[in-house]
């Protein structure tokens, strides 16, 4: 029985509402768990307060940027085109909802750490359930707010167009143009969360390790280390709020890009399909989460991977019926369904390939650990080699995925593949957030002196969390790349749509496909500028981590020198000072790269034209994608090589190999947790701002 499109459209807002309701239910369930003894609660409270204080400072900085950008939109709306008022509304919704998702996730995860440690007294599965449910709160909040936000704006703009507030010859096209503002708002918050959060977390981590482990010779999470609370706060700031904002942004911009392309190829059914896929996948994730269970002597990583695989398989079944309902032409619907299967397959393959290059179970990480036996230099060289090598199989997977999706359903197939990949967002965010919660739980268990059997369980979860953080970063990077590709395709279509409306020449086409001639000097110039940007951007983020770490090192040294009782355990360190240093650095250092990313695509577009801007976006996408993979995987491999030695291999803690591995891990930390992940929102914000301003660029670009 066929269901009308208006009814199917309700799947997204209903799924969004259910997601938020269940997130609240899970959060309430977690809050009902015991938070442990007074010392555990005190440590957890310090982490919670530090994380929320940073988040508030970050959001104030974002608000200042957002107000300036909104003012520009309103001025354009008042002087050039009224539709910019609508873009301003969607921009605010995107920014606020992204910040809200981060706030919800941070609040729940920082209150779950001590509860996970306390649950570890009962056993492995009990601790796994608390930490995983905390992740589910974050995942459901991200997807629920995204679906509700997009759906609400569609209904709002449909009403305003019908009431005559915005003039429109084609209401669907106008609504999609207005929605790009939401993508830009989400991109802005994601960039600040990734960059600022990454600087905070790695400044604290590197600083704490350099003085605590290397100079003072005290173990990780030792309460005598003045930077230990800042380090634990950083886990939440970077891996919870940062990852949540990143995938919220990818989710939003992929839906918008897919709807723009769907409108061109299939009309209204093509617009509705990405929303329904997103909504239906929520139910697949809820069922898939039931497979996350383990026995007391079981493997928590296997349990988490079972959840991901189950979600993908259930999603595949649902997508078949969804495409059959919305696209009545059997041949076309089957092609779109195959494209969705490609997206799911790419997601699973990326997770497993990343695991191969970053897990202690496989050759790459062990080769780095073995290289550490001859010193820090060989350890670093081998880690770089592993990171560089990891780009090749991932590139092959992405290329095959793009081609398979294209030959299944054209350019729309690529967008649907990206949407299908991102349909796993709920479970992926849950698995990612599990990592920092478990890490914090281990730290709390260590600092509060819980029994060895409890620490053994939290260590197991922490080890799994290190692996999942690496694999979910790989997912986030590839999802960002596919999202940016969908936006690039949408940008090219929008250029020619605007060119027709304004009666000017657009981009050339061959056989109905828009082409960008890379031999055109202006387009080549744009590609080179875009290709260089990720390197320049990464220089800012790497330097920022170094500056933050330097501040932490100097402060910890000062406290050890002036407070002699810290090392003896008779005097309490000043944890708040280190938290403040990291927070200040995280906010201060993100402003310049933020301005560059917003302004540069507009300069390229208005000075060199839309063709050069297309080349700029393509160049940035290619280099950023592989730089991010290289940095994330090399950093993850260095981290786990160090942990492989710490469990007793190759001499164990304190050995020559261990000291060399600590150096490698220190080099890798800003790569995997700051510079690499920061490229995800960078490439998406370049595309969203280009689509936003495409009409003005077509109209006002210099003719040189």
Image (spheres, helix red, strand yellow):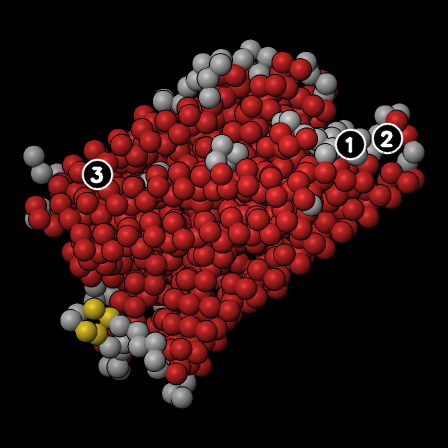
Answer with mark 3 or mark 2, whichever residue precedes in sequence: 3
What SS does tag 1 mark?
loop
Front-lying residue, 249 or 463: 463
Task: Residue 567: give its label.
Answer: 2
Q: Which residue is mark 3?
A: 319
Between the C-alphas of marks 3 and 1, the distance is 53 Å
- Rounded to the nearest whole Å, what is the CA distance between mark 3 and mark 2? 59 Å
- Which tag is nearer the camera, tag 3 or tag 2? 2
Pointer 2 local density, CA inside 10 Å: few below 14, some 14–19, many at least 20: some
Q: What residue is rendered at 53% in x and 45% in y?
A: 242
Residue sitting at the far bottom: 704
The image shows residue 340 at horizontal and vertical percentages of 24, 44
Give me the residue at 54% from left, 64% from top: 535
The residue labelled by disc 1 is 218
Give the mark nearest the N terminus, 3 or 1.
Answer: 1
Direction from residue 304 to residue 423 in the image, left or right: left
Q: Quick check: marks 1 and 2 in contact, CB under 8 Å?
A: yes
Left or right, residue 671 beside residue 377: left
Work out whether residue 447 or residue 109 is closer to the camera in this orientation and state it: 447
Q: Is residue 639 visible?
A: no
Above or below, 431 against 84 in this view is above
- Give the mark, 1 or 2, whose residue is nearer the N terminus: 1
Helix, strand or loop under label 2: helix
Viewer-nearest of labels 1 and 2?
A: 1
Quarter of the image where the N terminus is located: top left
Residue sitting at x 48%, y 73%: 529
Q: Secondary structure at mark 3?
A: helix
Q: Looking at the picture, how far across and down is residue 192, in whole percent?
A: 56, 53
- Work out whether residue 135 can be spotted: yes
């Amino acid at each position: 029985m066929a269901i009308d499109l208006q009814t199917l459209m309700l799947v997204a807002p209903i799924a969004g509402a259910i997601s938020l309701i269940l997130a609240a239910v899970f959060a309430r369930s977690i809050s009902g768990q015991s938070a442990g003894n007074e010392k555990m609660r005190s440590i957890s409270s310090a982490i919670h307060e530090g994380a929320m204080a940073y988040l508030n400072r970050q959001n104030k900085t974002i608000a200042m940027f957002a107000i300036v950008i909104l003012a520009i939109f309103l001025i354009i709306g008042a002087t050039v085109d009224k539709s910019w008022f609508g873009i301003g509304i969607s921009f605010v919704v995107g920014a606020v909802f992204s910040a809200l998702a981060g706030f919800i996730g941070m609040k729940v995860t920082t209150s779950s750490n001590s509860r996970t440690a306390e649950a570890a007294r009962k056993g492995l599965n009990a601790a796994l359930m608390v930490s995983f449910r905390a992740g589910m709160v974050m995942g459901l909040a991200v997807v629920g707010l995204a679906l509700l936000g997009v759906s609400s704006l569609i209904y709002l703009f449909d009403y305003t167009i019908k009431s005559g507030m915005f003039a429109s010859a084609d209401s669907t096209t106008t609504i999609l143009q207005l929605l790009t503002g939401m993508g830009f708002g989400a991109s802005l918050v994601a960039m600040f969360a990734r960059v600022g959060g990454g600087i905070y977390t790695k400044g604290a981590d590197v600083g704490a390790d350099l003085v605590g482990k290397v100079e003072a010779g005290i173990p990780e999470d030792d309460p005598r280390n003045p930077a230990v609370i800042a380090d634990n706060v950083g886990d939440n700031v970077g891996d919870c709020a940062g990852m949540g904002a990143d995938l919220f942004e990818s989710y939003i911009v992929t839906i918008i890009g897919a709807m723009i392309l769907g409108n061109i190829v299939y009309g209204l059914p093509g617009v509705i399909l990405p929303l329904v896929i997103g909504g239906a996948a929520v139910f697949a994730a809820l069922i898939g989460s039931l497979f996350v269970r383990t026995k007391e002597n079981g493997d928590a990583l296997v349990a988490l991977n079972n959840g991901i695989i189950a979600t993908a398989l259930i999603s595949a079944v649902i997508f078949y019926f969804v495409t059959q309902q919305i696209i009545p032409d059997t041949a076309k619907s089957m092609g779109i369904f195959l494209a969705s299967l490609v997206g799911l397959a790419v997601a699973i393959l990326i997770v497993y390939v990343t695991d191969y290059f970053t897990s202690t179970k496989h050759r790459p990480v062990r080769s780095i650990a073995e290289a550490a036996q001859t010193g820090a230099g060989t350890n670093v060289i081998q880690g770089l080699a592993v990171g560089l090598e990891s780009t090749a199989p991932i590139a092959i997977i992405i290329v095959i995925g793009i081609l398979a999706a294209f030959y299944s359903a054209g350019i729309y197939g690529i967008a649907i593949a990206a949407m299908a990949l991102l349909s796993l967002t709920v479970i992926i965010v849950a698995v990612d957030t599990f990592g920092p919660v478990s890490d914090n739980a281990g730290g709390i268990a260590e600092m509060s002196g819980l029994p060895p059997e409890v620490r053994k369980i939290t260590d197991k979860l922490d080890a799994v969390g290190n692996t999942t953080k690496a694999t979910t970063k790989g997912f986030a990077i590839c999802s960002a790349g596919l999202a940016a590709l969908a936006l690039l395709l949408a940008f090219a279509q929008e250029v020619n749509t605007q060119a027709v409306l304004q009666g000017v020449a657009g981009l050339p086409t061959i056989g109905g496909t828009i082409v960008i001639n890379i031999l055109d000097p202006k387009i080549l110039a744009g590609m080179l500028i875009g290709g260089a940007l990720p390197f320049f951007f990464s220089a800012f983020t790497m330097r920022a981590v170094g500056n933050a770490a330097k501040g932490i090192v100097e402060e910890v040294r000062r406290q050890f020198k002036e407070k002699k009782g810290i090392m003896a355990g008779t005097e309490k360190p000043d944890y708040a000072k280190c938290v403040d240093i990291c927070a200040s650095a995280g906010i201060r250092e993100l402003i310049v790269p933020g301005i560059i990313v917003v302004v540069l695509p507009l300069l390229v577009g208005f000075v060199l034209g839309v063709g050069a801007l297309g080349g700029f976006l393509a160049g940035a996408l290619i280099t950023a994608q592989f730089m991010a993979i290289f940095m994330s995987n090399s950093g993850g491999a260095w981290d786990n090589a160090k942990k492989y030695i710490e469990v007793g291999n190759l001499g164990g803690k304190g050995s020559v190999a261990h000291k060399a591995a600590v150096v490698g891990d220190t080099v890798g930390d800003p790569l995997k947790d700051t510079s690499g992940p920061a490229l995800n929102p960078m490439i998406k914000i370049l595309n969203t701002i280009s689509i936003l301003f495409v009409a003005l660029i077509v109209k006002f670009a210099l003719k040189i």
